[in-house]
Image (tube, rainbow, N blue to C red):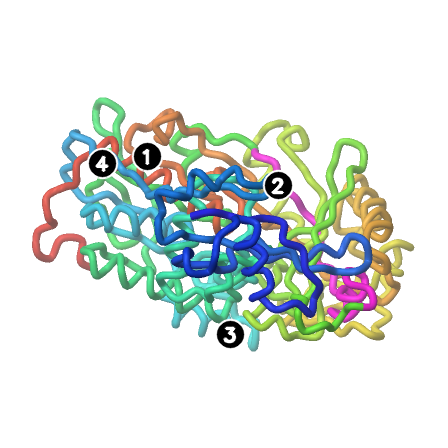
């Protein structure tokens, strides 16, 4: 396959024009191409006049002729397929591997293991997706929280109730495997070529169900409503079993993919003296603007053109040693109640695939790291929890969230002067000064950072912008140390994996880490013998 990059065309140009230009650049006729399709489409709006920027993928009928064309122009490159290659270990694995957590990391790890014949057992502390959706809807409507079935916990992980973003900066070849797998299981076709691909929470749910279905069809088993509570070691210090709320399970290989909010699991790991360390994370609030205002700021007079995607942004400013940045921007979305512990308010953002809502929202957060907590993971977790409890109190109970308009935040007053923007947080908002809920150093950094955002995206600090708090679960505050073999440095047989273990930050990077861990496990162990009838049944 050949990639012809940087084909720049006006908004009115049809796709066929980009394809024709790619063929001319290669110096071939349409009859010589087996396939000629969009591989990437982005928008360059930097100079105020947006243009479409295509990468066209061309596969020749004579693929052997492709290398000779790879250097025909600076914008042409060959893209050989990189299939997922897995080794096969020789060590005996008496029992099937266990994957703890069914978020992106656990889901993809279990899928790869199932495809290789390992018949993994998957534990998920929350319910299956349909029951989880009902629990989230009940919480939104009534304020009755289920600590194991919410926006953080349950089939699909925290990313299920998000925008379903597939952007990542990790640059790993396994990203292609993740994208192909998502497409196989029903993700919209444009995730293969959009500049900023997303699935949307509505479509992502079907993809997750489909992947789980393949895991089960290939001999894997999923135990919902089953939480990991302990680890059992043999005399040599290796893993030999686990304790769960469903009882003990023999296990010599455990993939720990519990997600960034599994604080009780972190407590258990620390109680067993496993090497958890502090990891940088960020805290702040959600900012809501009219989506039309974001579109105008990005696209200027071209805003609203049907060829342009709904506008989204990514902003960052350094304030001293800290970084203030936007995170998880949800065009046409809503702010959602994402608590997983009673008495705490947590905000997050969510969009459906159509991104048709009135408001745009994004987290605006400031970085913290181990130095803020004397390198003590317990203090980092306690800091998160303390912010959430303070937000709950400021909201007045019932999981209402504290909120203020931009003019109030910058003036450090509890003003909520609603005009163009109506808050979308589903449990309701209460006027409060978010500055008072954060340490002053962090609040001051956010105020400076917002001023910097406005210099980059005109109108960002419009007085009626709504800020809702607090956003505390941007990523895991801890990392469970692992070696080059992907096993925990202090417990052979335990594989820390994904965002909760501190090795990913988003759907794709978590899924990629799940594939990496599965590959490492396959290289270490041979598949176990088929489980006996009735083994691991609830």
**Mark 2, residue position:** 281
Mark nearest the camera among 2 and 3 is 2
Q: Earlier in the sequence, mark 4 or mark 2?
A: 4
Q: Residue furthest right?
A: 411
Label 3 to label 4: alpha-carbon separation: 38 Å
Circle 1 Cα neighbour tier, 10 Å, few/some/many (<14 / 14–19 / ≥20): many
**Mark 1, residue position:** 494
**Residue 80 place in picture, x, y as percent:** 40, 42
> Which residue is more in the foreground, 189 or 398?
189
Q: Earlier in the sequence, mark 3 or mark 1?
A: 3
In this view, 195 is above or below 207: above
**Mark 4, residue position:** 252
Label 3 to label 1: alpha-carbon separation: 35 Å
SS at badge 2: strand
SS at badge 3: helix
Label 4 to label 2: alpha-carbon separation: 32 Å
Label 1 to label 4: alpha-carbon separation: 8 Å
**Residue 8 place in picture, x, y as percent:** 67, 55
**Residue 465 place in picture, x, y as percent:** 81, 64
Q: Which residues are magenta?
A: 279-301
Q: Earlier in the sequence, mark 1 or mark 2?
A: 2
Q: Which mark is residue 431?
A: none
**Looking at the image, which residue is at 16% across and 40% down?**
527
**Residue 30 place in picture, x, y as percent:** 46, 60
Q: Quadrant of residue 459?
A: bottom right
Q: Earlier in the sequence, mark 1 or mark 4?
A: 4
Label 1 to label 2: alpha-carbon separation: 24 Å
Q: Earlier in the sequence, mark 2 or mark 3?
A: 3
Label 2 to label 3: alpha-carbon separation: 28 Å
Residue 431 seen by the camera: no
> Which residue is more in the foreground, 437 or 100?
100
In this view, 43 is above or below 143: above
């Amino acid at each position: 396959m050949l990639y012809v990059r940087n084909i720049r065309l006006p908004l009115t140009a049809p796709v066929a024009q980009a394809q024709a230009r790619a063929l001319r650049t290669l110096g071939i006729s349409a009859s010589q191409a087996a396939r000629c399709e969009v591989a990437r489409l982005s928008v360059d709006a930097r100079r105020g006049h947006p243009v479409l920027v295509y990468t066209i993928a061309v596969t020749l009928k004579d693929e052997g002729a492709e290398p000779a064309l790879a250097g025909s122009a600076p914008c042409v490159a060959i893209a050989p397929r990189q299939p997922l290659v897995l080794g096969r270990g020789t060590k005996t694995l008496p029992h099937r591997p266990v994957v703890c957590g069914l978020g992106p990391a656990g889901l993809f790890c279990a899928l790869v293991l199932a495809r290789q014949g390992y018949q993994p057992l998957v534990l998920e502390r929350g319910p299956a997706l349909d029951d989880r959706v009902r629990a989230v809807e009940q919480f939104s409507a009534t304020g009755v929280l289920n600590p194991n079935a919410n926006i953080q916990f349950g089939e699909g992980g925290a990313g299920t109730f998000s925008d379903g973003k597939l952007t990542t900066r990790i640059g790993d070849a396994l990203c292609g495997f993740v994208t192909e797998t998502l497409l196989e299981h029903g993700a919209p076709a444009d995730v293969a070529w959009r500049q900023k691909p997303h699935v949307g929470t509505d479509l992502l749910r079907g993809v997750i169900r489909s992947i789980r279905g393949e895991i089960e069809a290939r001999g894997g088993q999923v135990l919902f409503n089953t939480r990991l509570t302990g680890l059992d070691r043999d005399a040599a210090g290796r893993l030999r079993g686990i304790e769960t709320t469903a009882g003990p399970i023999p296990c010599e290989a455990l993939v720990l993919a519990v997600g960034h909010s599994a604080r009780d699991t972190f407590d258990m790991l620390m109680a067993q003296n496993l090497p958890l360390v502090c990891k940088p994370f960020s805290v702040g609030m959600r900012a809501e603007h009219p989506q039309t205002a974001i579109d105008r700021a990005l696209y200027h007079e071209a805003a609203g053109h049907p060829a342009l995607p709904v506008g989204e942004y990514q902003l960052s400013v350094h304030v001293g040693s800290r970084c203030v940045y936007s995170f998880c921007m949800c065009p046409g979305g809503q702010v959602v109640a994402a608590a997983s512990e009673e008495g705490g308010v947590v905000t997050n953002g969510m969009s459906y695939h159509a991104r048709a809502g009135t408001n745009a929202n994004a987290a605006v957060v400031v970085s913290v790291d181990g130095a803020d907590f004397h390198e003590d993971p317990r203090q980092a977790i306690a800091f998160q929890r303390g912010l959430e409890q303070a937000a709950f109190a400021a909201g007045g109970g019932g999981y209402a969230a504290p909120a203020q308009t931009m003019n109030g935040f910058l003036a450090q007053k509890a003003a909520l002067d609603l005009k163009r923007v109506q808050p979308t947080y589903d449990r309701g908002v209460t006027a409060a000064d978010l500055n008072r809920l954060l340490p002053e150093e962090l609040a001051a950094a956010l105020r400076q950072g917002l001023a910097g955002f406005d210099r980059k995206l005109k109108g960002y600090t419009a007085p009626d912008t709504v800020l809702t708090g607090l956003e505390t679960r941007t990523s895991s505050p801890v990392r469970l140390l692992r070696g080059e073999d992907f096993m925990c440095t202090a417990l052979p047989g335990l594989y820390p994996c994904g965002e909760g273990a501190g090795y990913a930050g988003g759907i794709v990077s978590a899924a990629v880490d799940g594939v990496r861990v599965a590959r490492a496990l396959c290289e270490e162990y041979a598949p176990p013998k088929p489980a006996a009838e009735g083994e691991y049944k609830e």
